[in-house]
Each structure stands twice: as structure tokens, then as C-alpha cells.
Image (cartoon, rainbow, N blue to C red):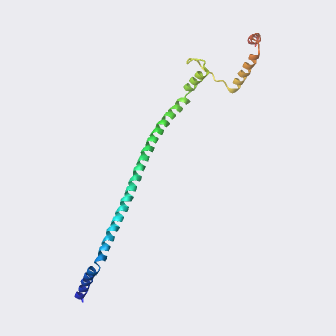
């Protein structure tokens, strides 16, 4: 029986080759076509991934440059805040903006209530004549 099974298999195989030669070639072409299709699909996907990777790298480089610029700007702003919060800088601005005094002048900061009284006195003096102011200065 074993020999006859081998003989049948060979015989079936020979029959398929002889009778199905066209079918075998068709199957071979289909196999090649499927391999080509898979290869083209794979290459297309790989090329798309490469393009996406290149774009991502470009975007990453652009963002890193922007980040570096922002960090430099941040350091500059922190330095400006530090300098602006120093009392010497604030006093210098007062001198510069008010247009009076020099670097050797001393500034006296008055409490709010005193400033209001001084303003009222200054407004009152503007309505007085020079003689009245002179008299007030020596009589008060």
C-alpha cells in the first residue's frame, strides 16, 4: 500500500503538471503579482514615513530655535525686571522724568497725608499775591 500511495501521488502530480500547465503558470504569475503589490505597498508606506520623519525633524529644529530665542528674551526680561526693581534705578527715573536734581540730590519720600497738605498749600499760594505770600512766610 505504501508504494501505491507514492505512485498515486506522483501520478497526481504528473497529471496536474500535464493537464494544469496553464493553471500552474497563472498561479505563478499571481504569486509574483502579489509579491510586487506587497513590495510596492511597503515601499510606499516607508517613503511616507520617511517624509513624515523629515517634516517632524524640520518642525523640531524650528521649535528648538524658537525656544532658544525665547530663553534669551526671558533672561533679558528677568535682568530688566531686576534692574528696574532696584531703588537706584527708580530714583534715577524720578530725576530723569521730573527733570530736576542731580545724582547727588537726596529724595525725601513724604507720607500720603503730607503730600495732600502740601498740594493744598501750593494751590492756595497760587491765588495769593506776592505781598500776601511774603507776609504769610514771615508771620506763620
- Write the residue at 74% across / 17% down: 126
Image position, residue 16 (x, y; %) = 28, 81
The answer to whether 46 appears left or right of 2 in the picture is right
Q: Where is 80 relative to 133, above or below?
A: below
Give how far across and how far down residue 69 sits, in percent: 46, 38
Q: Is residue 46 above or below residue 102?
A: below
Using residue 119 as the reference point, say whether residue 92 is left or right of it: left
Q: Quadrant of residue 36?
A: bottom left
Location of residue 54 with respect to 65 vertically, above or below: below
Q: Residue at x 26, y 79 (%)?
A: 17
Which quadrant is the N terminus positioned in?
bottom left
The residue drawn where x is 71% and y is 22% is: 119
- Of residues 115 and 23, the one nearer the viewer is 23
Quadrant of the rendered structure where residue 99 is?
A: top right
Q: Position of residue 84 (x, y in %)?
A: 55, 29
Among all residues in the image, which is located at the extreme left?
3
> Which quarter of the rendered picture does the C terminus lie within?
top right
Picture coordinates of residue 77, whole percent (x, y): 51, 34
Amino acid at each position: 500500500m505504501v508504494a501505491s500511495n507514492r505512485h498515486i501521488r506522483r501520478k497526481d502530480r504528473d497529471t496536474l503538471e500535464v493537464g494544469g500547465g496553464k493553471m500552474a503558470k497563472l498561479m505563478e504569475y499571481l504569486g509574483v503579482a502579489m509579491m510586487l503589490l506587497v513590495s510596492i505597498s511597503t515601499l510606499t508606506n516607508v517613503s511616507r514615513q520617511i517624509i513624515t520623519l523629515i517634516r517632524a525633524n524640520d518642525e523640531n529644529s524650528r521649535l528648538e530655535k524658537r525656544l532658544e530665542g525665547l530663553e534669551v528674551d526671558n533672561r533679558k526680561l528677568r535682568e530688566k525686571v531686576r534692574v528696574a526693581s532696584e531703588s537706584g534705578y527708580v530714583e534715577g527715573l524720578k530725576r530723569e522724568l521730573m527733570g530736576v536734581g542731580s545724582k547727588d540730590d537726596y529724595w525725601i519720600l513724604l507720607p500720603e497725608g503730607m503730600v495732600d497738605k502740601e498740594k493744598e498749600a501750593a494751590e492756595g499760594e497760587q491765588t495769593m499775591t506776592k505781598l500776601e505770600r511774603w507776609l504769610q512766610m514771615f508771620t506763620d
